[in-house]
Image (cartoon, helix red, strand yellow):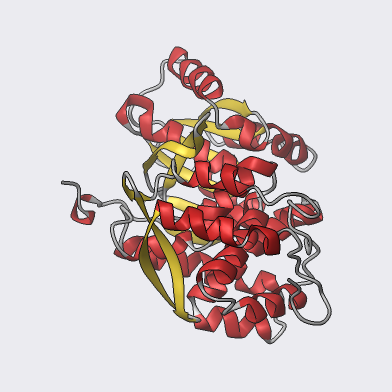
Amino acid sequence: MLTDKAVVMKCKIIPSDLKAIINSISKIESDTLLLVVDNKVYSLLEQEMDIVQEIQNKGKKVILWKSSEGEKAKSFDEYQCCVEFFLEKGIHRNCHLVAIGGGATTDFGGFVASTLLRGIKWTCVPTTLLAMIDAGIGGKTGINSKSGKNLIGSFYLPENVYINTAFLQTLPQREISSGLGEMIKYSFLNRSIYEELIKGKDYKEQIINCAQFKQQIVEEDFLELKNRKFLNLGHTFGHGLERIYNIPHGIAVVWGMALIFKIIQEENYLSELRLLLDILKWQEVDPPWHNKRFPSKDLYDYISRDKKRTSRNSIDLILLDKIGTPKIEKFFLDDLEKKLDKHESKLRIFNLRSAGHIIF
C-alpha cells in the first residue's frame, strides 16, 4: 500500500514578481523547458514580455503548448494532443515543465508532467486567486471525465510555486469571488485565518497564509489518507453544483458549505458564513438554483459517483466541531438522499443577503 513515506519531493512557495519568476525559471537545471500556458494568459503576458524569448536568451530550449482556456483544457483530447506534441519534439527525462495559468491549467500541466516519460519535474506559476491559494498548491493534478471533475489524475508535487499577486489585476470580479470562496473555506479550517478576515484585513494579505496552511497539511498527509481530507469542506456538494450549473469552482464551494451547514449541521456556522461574505463584499447572494427546483436528484447522482466515496454506499463528509476544528463523518448515501429530499422546499427559497439575517 502507498504511504506518505514514499514521498520525497518538496515544494517551495515563493512570492515573486514576473521578472524574477522568469529569471528563476531560466536557472532551472535543465536544457529544455516545456511551457504549458493558458492561451488567454499567454496573450496577456505577451503585452508585458515575450517569456519564450526571455528564457531562450538565457540559453534554454523552450517548447510551448498553449492550452485551451479554463476547464476546457482538462479533457482527454487536450491531454492527448499535448503529450503527443511534446513527445514528437524528442523530449528527455530531465526536461522541466512549467505550468502558467489558473487552477485548471495547473491541474492539467501537472498531470502532463506526472505522466510524460513516467514523470518529469515541474513548476507552477498560478495566475488566479483560486490557483494561488488552492489548486496550485499540494500536487493534486488531473483531468475531467464525463462522469465528473478530476476523476482522472495523480498526486504529483511541483518543485516550486511562484506567487505574483499582480496577476490578480487582470481577473474579472467573478474569478476573484471564486478564489475568495476557497479562502472562506480556509477560514473555517484555520482559526487565525478566520480572525484576520473578520478584522477586515485585505484578502491579498492572506494569500501566502492560505498557501502555507495548505502546504503544511499536504506535507503531513500528501496522499490524502487522513487530515488532508479536511480541505474537502464544501466540495462534495460543491463539485456537483459546479458541474450541474457550470459555475466557478470557488463559488460552488461556498454553496456547498452553505448546504452542509444547513442540512447537516442544523444551521450552525451559517451566521459566520454570512459575516465573512459581507466583509469580503460577496456578490453571489443567490444560489444557482434561485427560484427554480432544487436539484436534489441530480446532486445525489453526482455525489454517488464522487471520488471521496469510502464504499459502494457511503461517503466521507467534512463537518466542523468548531471554527478551526474540522472533522470527518461517514454518511450512508441513502441517508444523504433523504436529507436532500427533506430540505428541498426550503432550499428552493434559500439565499445569502448582504443585510439582515440569512433567509430561508
Indicate the position of residue 214 as horizontal and vertical percent values. Answer: 45, 64
Nearest the viewer among 67 and 253 is 253
Which image quadrant for residue 216? bottom left
- Whether residue 110 is visible to the viewer of this picture, yes or no, is no
Q: Is residue 292 left or right of residue 225?
A: right
Any part of residue 293 in sight: yes
Q: Nearer the viewer, residue 88 or 236?
A: 236
Pick the front one: 173 or 316: 316
Q: Is residue 87 above or below residue 145?
A: above
> As displayed, is residue 267 above or below residue 51?
below
Farthest residue, direction top:
88
- Where residue 30 appears, as percent x and y from the top left, is 40, 35
Residue drawn at (57%, 44%) of the image: 297
Is 178 above or below relative to 269?
A: above
| Left or right position of 151 against 65 | left
Q: Quadrant of the C terminus?
A: bottom right
Instruction: Please tell me which residue is depicted at 68% across the width and 52% down the height of the picture.
Output: 294
Q: Is residue 5 left or right of residue 354?
A: left
The number of discs equals 0
Residue drawn at the location 53% of the way across and 17% of the way down: 81
> Picture coordinates of residue 151 (x, y %)?
44, 37
Q: Is residue 201 left or right of residue 130?
A: right
- The quadrant in which residue 113 appears is top left
Relative depth, front residue between 212 and 334: 334
Answer with the quarter of the image where residue 94 lies. Answer: top left
Q: Position of residue 353 (x, y in %)?
A: 80, 72
Q: Residue at x 48, y 20 (%)?
A: 86
Looking at this rendering, what residue extends furthest in the left direction? Answer: 1
